[in-house]
Every structure is written in C-alpha cells, then in structure tokens.
C-alpha cells in the first residue's frame, strides 16, 4: 500500500504533465547546473561593495531559495534609506541556456504540499543563486529614500555584492515585533540588527498606510496546507498574515514599482503585472450591501478598501471569508507588455499603475526576465528581448502561472479529500467561494476545505453562507462533493 505522501507526489507529477509543465530537469540541464562555477568571480568596477551592511533575509521557516535581503539607514529625522538586494540569478543562468529554457517553459516554481517542483535546480535556487547566510552573492540593489509619510521620493538601481548576515523566519520575527517574544537569537547575535529591523518595520508600516490611503486592498485569504504525521495527512494548517510578512510585502511592492519606473525612464519595455478592473463588481456591491455598505456603481478601489477595513474591524474572525469572496470576484492577475510611451493597465488591487515582478528571480521567470532588462539598461546596452518576443513571453507567463496554480490547487484538494474521506455524511457550515456556469463552490469554516455543491446549489452566489453535507470524495481528481442542507 502506498503512503498518502507518495500518492500526492504522484498526483502532482501527473498534474504537471497534464498542464504542459515539465516536472523534472533533463540530463543536459543538470549537467549545465553542475558545471557552473561557485562564488562571484572577478568583480566589475561598476559593482558596488555592500558586504558591510546589516543585510538580513526574512522568509518562511523552511525556505531555502532566498531571493531578497533588506537593510535600512536613517538619513534624517524624516527620511530613511531602504535598500533591497535581489539575487542576481542571471549571473549564473544565461539567456538561451538549457537552464533558461526550462525556466522559460515552466515560468515558476510549483509549491505543492507533497513536493516542490523548482523552476531552477536546487543546486542553484537553494545554493549558487540563493542569498544564503554568510555567503557572498551578486545582487541587483533597489535603493530608495522613503519619507515619513511613506512616499518613495528617490529610487536608484545598481549592481552590488552583498552578504546575508542573518537568515530569519517570518513567525519568529513577527512574534518579536508584536511583543510576544524576545528577539530571535540570530537577531541578537548581530550587533545593531535589532534596531535596524525595528527601523525597517516602521518604514514598512508607513508605506502600507500610504498605499491604503490610495486604495490598495488589504485582503486576508487563508490557504490551507496539509500537515503530515509521518506520511499521512493529519490536518490542514492555515498560514496567517503577520507583521514580518507585511514588511517584506510592502518593501517588495515598493521595489517592483521603482524597477518599473526605472525601465520606463531608460526607454526600455517591460513586462508589467496587472490586475484589471473586476468584471463582477456588481456582486462585490451586493456583498457590501449585505453588510450595510453602499459602494459606487463603477469599480472604485478606495471605496472597496474602506469597506474591507470596516469589516476587518467589525468581524476579524470572519474577515478572511469575505476576503476570499472578494478575491474570487476580482479575478486573477496577468502579465502584459508595456512599451515606451504606451501605458499598461494598472494593478487594481495595489492601486498602482507602474508595477512589475522583479524580486523573486529564483522562482519566477518574469522576475529573471526583468532582471536582464535592468542589467542591460544599467550597462547602456539594448534590450536583450525584441518587443514581439516580450509580448509572447508575457502571455506565456500568464498561462503557465495559471497552470501552476491549478497544480497547486489540485494537490491541496487531493490532500483535503484524503483528510475528509472518513467524514462522508457529516454536515458543515460553509460559504460560497465560486458560482458560475461551471459550478458552485463552497469552503467549510472548519476544517478549511473547499468543494463543489452538486445538489441544491440553485440561487447561491459568492459570499453566501450555507449548511452542506459531505457526499463524496475522489482523491485522484481532488473532488469533494457536497449537497445543500436546509
């Protein structure tokens, strides 16, 4: 008899192939990876030496592919310099190489509960191109001046060599920020790091406050992850938002905006990340009305954020349920080519127009592509990609990202089906997360399992609360079927 974990690994492998993704690296790709020289090599005189700064990474507890480091410098009572170092993956993964071909095909790492399918071999993503603690690494640095109101008043990009002084984890740093624990041991071990992180936290909160004043949406969705006891699925765990995650999120948004504007000023094309105005705005208006709030008839990010903030204060326990409903109604982001002088669509959820993906090149191909554009611009060289190729890549990255998300979602659903198969016949409280001609979907409040309503779905819409009975599970296909009760 196979284990639950191996069942999920097999399902994930099959799903990758079915969606046009490549689950394994070829012999040629692995040979190319093994042939790469470690270290940073001879330094170009234009590369800044920033090894002496108090760089640190903050990521998930088990993350090994470290893409960013951050550090702050107080320059006046009302201004702070924030520097973000992004791993120079292009220094090892050359355009047109076998490794580049694999990354270009999948466009992203695929993170399933049973197995990770990295965009680049672990020899690179967790070693040679990862900003590992104590290792000298080449990086692109986004250097920003942020005033006391959270406005980025200046920004510059450059190449540099850096060293990660402390590999930190979100949960431990957040607990310290929130006064629930002492500083993590690695923070206390580096002189000045605690003060530096406190300074970063203050700037991040100012950045966040300013974005929300301009209509950025503060959503809180809960994605369940399988918890294994041995090789068996024993529970589903929800990842919670916290101050440390927000710090990195706010800095990365600022870095991505600064990078997009840098390329625009240089007259370079870019691949932007956009979220168009929601097509189901009328249902968002209906959801708000249920809670006593009247939204405008046309999409309005600022009004929507005001409503979300009010609901977060009024009912924090159920706010993630409302957030998930809004996320479903907003639709998915996509990649779009922006050429010099031609404006791409804004990102509705972030309330910014100039936005690209640039801060995770170990695990996202659009970020590696952007990195190559930035390096060419810094060197006063032409774009390494013709406009037609960039347009094709933008569309391909959107399609492949959607395929990867479907693989991740299938494995989550298969893990949930494994957990729920002994509970057929039980009833649960749920809310509707999707409603279309393709079907009606609900998520249980506890455990946080999503499935399809196969009977009694008539009249249900996104955001509705409902009681359902578990009728059937299919682990292979990730099906969990409910009927409506009452």
Image (tube, grey):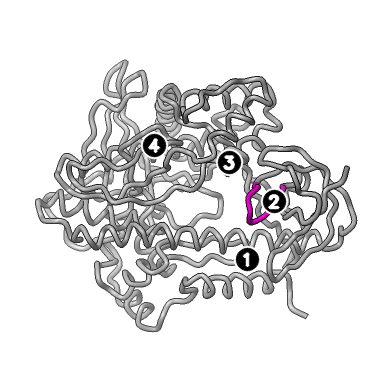
Q: Quadrant of the N terminus?
A: bottom right
**In the rendered view, would you say 263 is above or below 9?**
above
Range drawn in magenta: 434-442
Q: Is residue 343 left or right of residue 67?
A: left
Q: Which residue is mark 1?
A: 114
Label 2 to label 3: alpha-carbon separation? 35 Å
Q: Secondary structure at mark 1?
A: loop
Q: Position of residue 384 (x, y in %)?
A: 18, 60
Q: Position of residue 74 (x, y in %)?
A: 31, 25
Q: Which residue is mark 4?
A: 251
Q: Residue furthest bottom?
A: 27
Q: Earlier in the sequence, mark 2 or mark 4?
A: 4
Find out whether the residues at labels 3 and 1 contact each other: C-beta distance under 8 Å: no
Label 2 to label 4: alpha-carbon separation? 37 Å
Q: Secondary structure at mark 4?
A: helix
Q: Earlier in the sequence, mark 1 or mark 4?
A: 1
Q: Position of residue 410 (x, y in %)?
A: 62, 62
């Amino acid at each position: 008899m196979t284990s639950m974990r191996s069942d999920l690994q097999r399902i994930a492998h099959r799903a990758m192939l079915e969606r046009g993704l490549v689950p394994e690296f070829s012999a040629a790709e692995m040979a190319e990876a093994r042939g790469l020289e470690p270290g940073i090599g001879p330094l170009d005189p234009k590369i800044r030496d920033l090894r002496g700064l108090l760089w640190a990474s903050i990521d998930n507890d088990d993350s090994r592919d470290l893409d960013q480091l951050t550090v702050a410098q107080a320059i006046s009572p009302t201004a702070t310099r924030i520097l973000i170092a992004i791993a120079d993956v292009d220094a090892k993964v050359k355009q047109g190489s076998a490794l580049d071909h694999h990354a270009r095909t999948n466009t992203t790492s695929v993170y399933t509960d049973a197995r990770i399918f990295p965009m680049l071999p672990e020899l690179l993503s967790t070693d040679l191109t990862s900003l590992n603690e104590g290792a000298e690494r080449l990086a692109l640095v986004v250097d920003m001046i942020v005033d006391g109101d959270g406005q980025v008043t200046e920004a510059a990009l450059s190449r540099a060599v850096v060293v990660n002084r402390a590999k930190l984890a979100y949960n431990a740093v957040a607990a310290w920020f929130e006064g629930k624990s002492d500083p993590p041991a690695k923070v206390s071990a580096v002189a000045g790091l605690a003060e530096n992180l406190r300074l970063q936290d203050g700037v991040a909160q100012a950045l966040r406050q300013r974005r929300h004043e301009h209509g950025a949406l503060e959503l809180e969705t809960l994605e369940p992850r399988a918890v294994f006891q041995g090789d068996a699925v024993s529970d589903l765990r929800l990842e919670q938002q916290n101050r440390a995650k927000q710090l990195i999120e706010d800095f990365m948004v600022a870095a991505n905006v600064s990078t997009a504007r840098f390329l625009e000023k240089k007259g370079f094309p870019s691949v932007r990340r956009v979220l168009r105005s929601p097509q189901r705005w009328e249902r968002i208006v209906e959801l708000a009305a249920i809670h006593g709030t009247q939204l405008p008839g046309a999409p309005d990010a600022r009004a929507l954020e005001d409503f979300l903030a009010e609901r977060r204060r009024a009912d924090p326990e159920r706010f993630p349920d409302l957030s998930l409903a809004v996320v479903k109604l907003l639709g998915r982001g996509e990649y779009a080519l922006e050429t010099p002088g031609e404006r791409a669509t804004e990102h509705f959820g972030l309330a910014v127009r100039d936005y690209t993906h640039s801060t995770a090149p170990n695990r996202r191909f659009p970020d590696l592509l952007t990195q190559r554009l930035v390096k060419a611009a810094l060197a006063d060289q032409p774009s390494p990609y013709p406009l037609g190729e960039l347009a094709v890549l933008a569309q391909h990255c959107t399609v492949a990202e959607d395929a990867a998300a479907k693989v991740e979602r299938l494995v989550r659903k298969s893990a949930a089906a494994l957990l729920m198969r002994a509970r057929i016949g039980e009833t649960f409280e749920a809310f509707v997360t999707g409603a279309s001609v393709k079907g009606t979907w609900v998520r249980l409040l506890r455990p946080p399992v999503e499935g399809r309503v196969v009977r009694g779905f008539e009249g249900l819409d996104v955001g509705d609360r409902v009681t359902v009975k578990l009728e059937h599970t299919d682990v292979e296909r990730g099906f969990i079927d409910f009927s409506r009760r009452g």
